[in-house]
Image: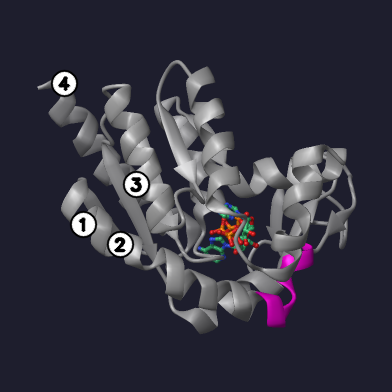
Amino acid sequence: MKIILLGCPGAGKGTQAEGLVKKYGLTHLSTGDLFRAEIAKGSPLGQKVQDYMKRGTLVPDEVVVEVVAAKLDDISGGWLLDGFPRTLPQAQALDGYLKSNQVKIDAVLYLAMEEDTVVSRLSGRRSCAKCKAVYNVATKPPKTEGKCDGCGGDLMQREDDKEATIRKRMMVFNDLTQPLVTFYKTECPFHEVDGSGSPGEVGEKLFAILDKVQETQKA
Ligand code: AP5
C-alpha cells in the first residue's frame, strides 16, 4: 500500500506511523526524521535545512522534493509518507512523480486535532538521543526520569518543541499544509480521523480503514 499520513505538528503522525508500518509491512518515510538525522551527521543537507527547522519554518520545496524522490526510487514495496507533502507544490510534485511511475495513493489519512491539545502534547515530548524512541512526560513517561526505557539513552527535548516555535509551526501548518486537505479530498481516497483519543484508540481507527483498503484490493 502507498499511504500519506497528514496532520498538524503533534497530531501523532510519528506515533501512529510506528504501528502502521509494522502491521502492513510498509517503509516509513518521515522527512522530519530524515532531516534531523542529516543535521546530527553534520552533512551538507543537514547544514542546509537546520535553520529552517530551528525556526519552525519549512525547508524549501525544491530541496524536500529532490530528497523524497530519491528515497522513493530506492523503496521497492509499500510506503507511508509522514510529514510530506506539506505544501501544494510538494503535493503536485509528488503527483507528477507517481503518475510517471504509474503508482496510485491507496489512502490519505488525516489526523484532525485542536491547537491547544497539540501545544501541550509537544511541550511534553521527549526523544531518546540514542534510539530515537518517543516519550511524553504527561501521557507516556519513561520509568526513570530522563532515561530511555529501551536503551538507557538520555531523553532530549526537540529544539522546535518550545512553545513559541510550536505556535509558529502551527501557523505554517494552517497557511501552507491545511490546503492539502481540500486537495486530497478530491484527488485520492481520503479519511479523516479524530487524533485526540488515546494512541491505541486512534490506531484502531486507522487499522480499520487500512484493513478495508486491503480487503477491497484483494476482492
Ligand atoms: P516533522 O518532524 O515532520 O514535525 P511535525 O510535522 O511538526 O510533526 P511532529 O513530529 O512534531 O509531530 P507528530 O505528528 O509526528 O507527533 P508525535 O507522534 O511525535 O517536521 C519538523 C520540521 O522539519 C518542520 O517544521 C520543517 O522545518 C521540516 N520539514 C519536515 N518535513 C518537511 C516538508 N515536507 N517540507 C518542508 N519542511 C519540512 O507525537 C507528539 C507527542 O504527543 C509525543 O510526545 C507523543 O508521545 C504524544 N502523543 C502522540 N499521540 C498521542 C495521543 N493519541 N494521545 C496522547 N499523546 C500522544
Q: Which numbered mark, 4 or 3, is in the foreground of this view?
A: 3
Q: Which numbered disc, 3 or 2, marks the residue that appears first in the sequence?
A: 3
Q: Position of residue 105 (x, y in %)?
A: 28, 36
Residue 22 in the image: above or below residue 190: above
Q: Which numbered disc, 4 or 3, marks the residue that appears first in the sequence?
A: 3
Residue tagged by mark 2?
Answer: 181
Residue tagged by mark 4?
Answer: 218
**Image side of residue 114 versus residue 188, left or right:** right
**Image side of residue 9 versus residue 209, left or right:** right
Label 3 crowd (10 A; few <14 / some 14-19 / many >=20): few
Three-letter residue code for mark 3 = Gln
Three-letter residue code for mark 1 = Lys
Residue tagged by mark 1?
Answer: 185
What whole-number distance in Å separates the C-alpha atoms at marks 1 and 4? 24 Å
**Residue 104: within the magenta?**
no
> Could you tell me which secondary element the residue under label 2 belongs to?
helix
Q: Position of residue 44 (x, y in %)?
A: 81, 39
Label 2 crowd (10 A; few <14 / some 14-19 / many >=20): some
Three-letter residue code for mark 4 = Lys
Q: Is mark 4 within 8 Å of ligand 1?
A: no
Three-letter residue code for mark 2 = Val
Between residue 132 and residue 40, name the one nearer to us: 40
Residue 56 in the image: above or below residue 31: below
On the rendered image, what quadrant is the C terminus found in? Answer: top left
